[in-house]
Image (cartoon, helix red, strand yellow):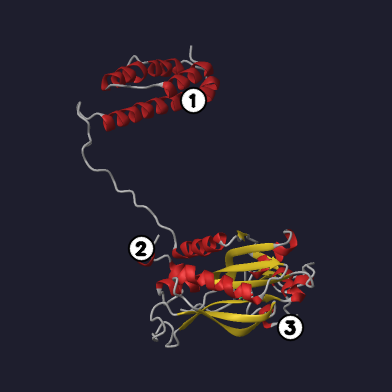
Amino acid sequence: MIDQNKIDEMMAQLREMKAAREQDLEEMRIKWLGRKGEITRLFDEFRQLTPEEKRTLGQKLNELKVNATRKIEELRESLNQIVDGGKASFDLTKPGDMVELGSRHPISVTREEILSIFRKFGYSVAEGPEIEDDWHVFGALNFPPEHPARDMQDTFFVSPGGENPILLRTHTSSVQVRTMESQSLPIRVVCPGRVFRNEAISARAHCIFHQVEGLYIDKNVSFADLKQAILLFAQEMFGADTRIRMRPSYFPFTEPSAEVDVSCNICHGEGCNICKNTGWLEILGCGMVDPAVLEANGIDSKVYSGFAFGMGIERIAMLKWQVKDLRHYFENDLRFLREFETVI
Ligand code: DAH
């Protein structure tokens, strides 16, 4: 007689059903749903139940019928896919669909190239958080309290109030500070990462871009060491005949500070529109770590000295590939990205 267990048992059998041939399906249909089929019989029995029993079993029994119909339909569809009147319904000799390979973004490629040059020089790689506090981005790097970089106009604040506001880092120099806090001396690191500035987006500026920061601290590190490191880097990056020049500059965290230009690798000094007829292209800022920064980070500036440098990855990539508009790097236009497929 029809009952709950019987229906459950049939549901379970239904789930396990398989069909290898059209004939199996027909047998299955007759066995379950045919005029004398098991489900049809259950419906006959159902008619004799009391209204109370009908209420509890009616829905279940309907479900069973719907499931059986659907299952047979599904099995028929999958059989049809494999067999079509005894023949395969698809052409096994047709060529397959092309799998398109992606390629690496030019900024990732440039980042990797910069890091691999410094790895060869014995630098290790350090990374830090993009959401930082005022101390790591400004305070420990000798920025005076009234410095304009600390202004809303220049920096994105996450929570502006209090002693040590939380903000999006404006440069990767913050990772210098974290490295000085966590690593023992001597230190020789490069720190790649994304930085954020409250700037209007144009061909030459973006509110998000990437930098690589470098820091070397040991006994007797001199400006000559800095100059040599930058020269070797420039020659690895832009070609063995590349020359550099240093112009005096100012950063709160280095003293003395310099900006570095490389000889224009497009016109080789003849003058072109990329170097604006000067024969030189600016690539980075650098300097000797200010003793105040060493002291702020618990390093004895009478014993240790160091140099630091920072460069924009977009800028290096623009110079290397003569990309004139920074926005191309962020728009993910495939026509632009595909130009780098062979480079990568
Ligand atoms: N942090 C500077 C910037 O974002 C770049 C920089 C300049 C980093 C000089 C340095 C440095 O480490 O010594 O503009």
> In the figure, residue 160 lies in which quadrant?
bottom right
Q: Is residue 163 visible?
A: no
CA separation in Å, label 1 and label 3: 76 Å
* For residue 8, side relative to residue 321 (left or right): right
- Earlier residue among tags 1 and 2: 1
The image shows residue 201 at horizontal and vertical percentages of: 50, 77
Residue type for callout 3: Glu
- Earlier residue among tags 3 and 2: 3
Tell me, for residue 338, which label it has, or none.
Answer: 2
* Residue at 36%, 63% in the rendered image: 338
Tell me, for residue 146, which label it has, or none.
Answer: 3
Secondary structure, mark 3, is loop
Quarter of the picture holding the C terminus? bottom left
Residue type for callout 1: Lys
Residue type for callout 2: Arg
* Quadrant assignment for ligand 1: bottom right
Is 184 in front, or is 48? Answer: 184
With respect to residue 265, does 41 lie above or below? above
Q: Is residue 315 visible?
A: yes
* Residue at 21%, 41% in the rendered image: 94
Is 332 in front, or is 86? Answer: 332
Q: Is mark 2 within 8 Å of ligand 1?
A: no
Between label 1 and label 3, give the one nearer the viewer.
3
- Earlier residue among tags 1 and 3: 1
The image shows residue 33 at horizontal and vertical percentages of: 35, 20
With respect to residue 86, does 338 lie above or below? below
- Could you tell me if the residues under marks 3 and 2 are in contact, i.e. CB atoms within 8 Å? no
Residue that label 1 marks: 60
The image shows residue 284 at horizontal and vertical percentages of: 56, 76
